[in-house]
Image (tube, rainbow, N blue to C red):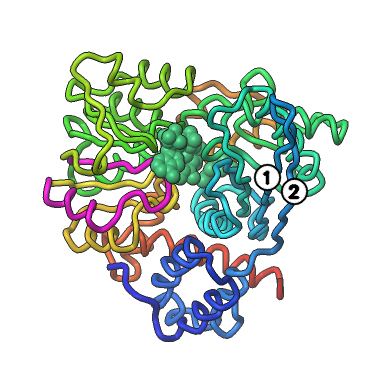
């Protein structure tokens, strides 16, 4: 079971706390990985002697910059942009950009840290990085979003490149934003360097199945977990939090595999639809009209909108948190367990608090951590880079089949590592130990870096 930090590693965590004050999400992400590494350093003491864990905890480079832009009323606005280039031992820095008013340096560092191990687990040649800005796209016109993206890229372009750092989307960054960012990168560099960004539109270098990949991949992973335990997703009742990119395509794949999604949410509340969530309506409300989720219940007979409590009050056998970090706490986990939840797979990054993870594991619930379960998005980004490098464009079926194969490989790798260390069924341990070992071995091979 995922536990506390081994005394042999406590000094590493103490140094992270001391050197990164106030960055609670970053502390949480580091603590979760360190709590898995006790058995790993006992088996491989040279990781401690060569201080490889301390090196991994320190980002290779952190970039913070001003993003000034003019809104539709002619008023100057100032935001803060970030790119944390965390680890390049396995390939160019790779990870999304998040636009949300809550974004701080510590947010980007937690996401970048997770990304290192997630990207290793994909088996693709990609390092770890993450970026973003404290910009709030809600209520902004396309013109405002474009001017913001152009200003951000006017600074960021000098730090990017298809062999250097390759951003993509995350919360608040989808195909529209990637388009504006790519357009400005192209203008600043005078190069059509398709592989510098992923999540592009299909007409200009994007990959089929990238839009669907994170949500589909999360459900492929949950399906593997179910099969491994002799269970099935078919016929299960499923709750999916969020209603953005990851949530929408997770819901689509659950329905395809015969599950019934009865609830989804956004930051204003959740909707319950016992007849099964109508995905076309969610897409219309959230993707096309950029409305609040209440509009779903307003237009769908039999559905109800709830603004109190949490979506995890809705009974389900499968729970897929696909919105944001720390959205599912210990109390919510307790409710889910009481209501009979059997499988939890994280579509979002770190959506379950450490207390929630403990509750699930102690209750024998199958728990798939984000760095394994949601790795299908970044893996398909790597497939997009592969297509760009070879000036090729694959069919949806081929790309989706590769995604399915990658998710099966991740599941196998995580399960095997957990068993190898005598911790069968502990997906948190398996993911952390396996991802870490690959990154650490590569680092050591490259010298003192
Ligand atoms: P989107 O912006 O498309 O959707 C985010 C969803 O989460 C929206 O429904 C949003 O509600 C909700 N949400 C965001 N912030 C909060 C908050 N503070 N409280 C409650 N709800 C919130 O983002 P994605 O779907 O791309 O990302 C969702 C999660 O998945 C994130 O954790 C991201 O890091 C992770 N992820 C994304 C990948 C990708 O490829 N896009 C890959 C792997 C992980 P509202 O509309 O009200 O803001
Ligand atoms: O958290 C993630 O893995 C992402 N937001 C996707 C990153 C990517 O480069 O596709």
Counting residues from the start of the chain, the first of labels 2 and 1 encountered is 2
Tag 2 near tag 1, CB within 8 Å = yes
Q: Which mark is residue 66?
A: 2
Extent of the magenta region: 316-339
Mark 2 Cα within 10 Å, few/some/many (few <14, many 20+)? some
Q: For mark 1, what is the residue? A: 79
Q: In this image, 63 relative to 255: left or right?
A: right
Secondary-structure class at tag 1: strand
Q: How many marks?
A: 2
The spot of residue 174 in percent (x, y) is: 57, 31
Quadrant assignment, res 256: top left
Image quadrant where one finds the N terminus:
bottom left
Which residue is located at x 67 percent, y 51 percent? 82
Q: Is residue 132 above or below residue 45?
A: above
Which residue is located at x 43 percent, y 82 percent? 42
Q: Nearer the viewer, residue 27 or 4?
A: 27
Q: Nearer the viewer, residue 351 or 443?
A: 351
**Magenta-colored stretch includes residue 230:** no
The spot of residue 150 in percent (x, y) is: 75, 33
Quadrant assignment, res 182: top right
The spot of residue 172 in percent (x, y) is: 54, 36
Which residue is located at x 25 percent, y 32 percent? 306
Residues at marks 2 and 1, CA–CA distance in whole angstroms: 6 Å
**Magenta-colored stretch includes residue 335:** yes
Tell me: is circle 2 under 8 Å from ligand 1.
Answer: no
Q: Does residue 64 appear in this view?
A: yes
Image quadrant where one finds the C terminus:
bottom right
Q: Is residue 142 above or below residue 181?
A: above
Secondary-structure class at tag 2: strand
């Amino acid at each position: 079971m995922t536990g506390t930090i081994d005394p042999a590693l406590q000094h590493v965590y103490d140094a992270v706390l001391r050197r990164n004050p106030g960055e609670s999400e970053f502390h949480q992400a580091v603590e979760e990985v360190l709590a898995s590494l006790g058995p790993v350093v006992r088996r491989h003491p040279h990781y401690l002697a060569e201080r490889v864990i301390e090196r991994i905890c320190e980002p290779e480079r952190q970039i913070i910059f001003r993003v000034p832009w003019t809104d539709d009323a002619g008023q100057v606005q100032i935001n803060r942009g970030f790119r944390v280039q965390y680890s390049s031992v396995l390939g160019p820095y790779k990870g999304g950009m998040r636009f949300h008013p809550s974004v701080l340096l510590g947010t980007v560092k937690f996401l970048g840290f997770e990304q290192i191990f997630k990207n290793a687990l994909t088996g693709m040649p990609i390092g770890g990085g993450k970026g973003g800005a404290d910009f709030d796209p809600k209520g902004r016109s396309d013109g405002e979003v474009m001017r913001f993206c152009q200003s951000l890229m006017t600074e960021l372009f000098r730090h990017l490149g298809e062999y250097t750092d390759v951003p993509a989307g995350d919360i608040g960054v989808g195909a529209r934003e990637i388009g504006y960012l790519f357009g400005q990168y192209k203008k600043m560099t005078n190069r059509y360097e398709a592989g510098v960004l992923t999540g592009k539109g299909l007409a200009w270098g994007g990959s089929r199945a990238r839009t669907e990949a994170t949500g589909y991949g999360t459900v492929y992973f949950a399906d593997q977990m179910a099969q491994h335990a002799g269970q099935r997703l078919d016929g299960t009742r499923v709750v999916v939090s969020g209603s953005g990119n990851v949530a929408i395509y997770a819901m689509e794949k659950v329905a395809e595999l015969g599950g019934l999604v009865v609830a989804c949410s956004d930051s204003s509340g959740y909707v319950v639809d016992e007849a099964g969530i109508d995905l076309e309506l969610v897409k219309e409300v959230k993707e096309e009209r950029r409305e609040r989720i209440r509009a779903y219940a307003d237009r769908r007979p039999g559905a109800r909108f709830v603004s109190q409590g949490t979506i995890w009050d809705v009974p389900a056998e499968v729970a897929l948190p696909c919105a944001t970090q720390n959205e599912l706490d210990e109390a919510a986990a307790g409710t889910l367990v009481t209501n009979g939840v059997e499988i939890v797979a994280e579509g979002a990054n770190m959506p379950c608090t450490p207390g929630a993870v403990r509750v699930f594991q102690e209750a024998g619930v199958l728990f798939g951590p984000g760095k394994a379960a949601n790795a299908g998005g970044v893996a398909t980004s790597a497939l997009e880079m592969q297509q760009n490098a070879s000036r090729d464009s694959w069919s949806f079926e081929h790309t989706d089949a590769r995604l399915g194969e990658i998710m099966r490989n991740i599941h196998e790798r995580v399960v095997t590592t957990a068993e190898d260390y005598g911790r069968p069924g502990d997906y948190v341990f398996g993911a952390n130990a396996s991802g870490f070992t690959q990154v650490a071995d590569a680092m050591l091979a490259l010298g003192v870096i």
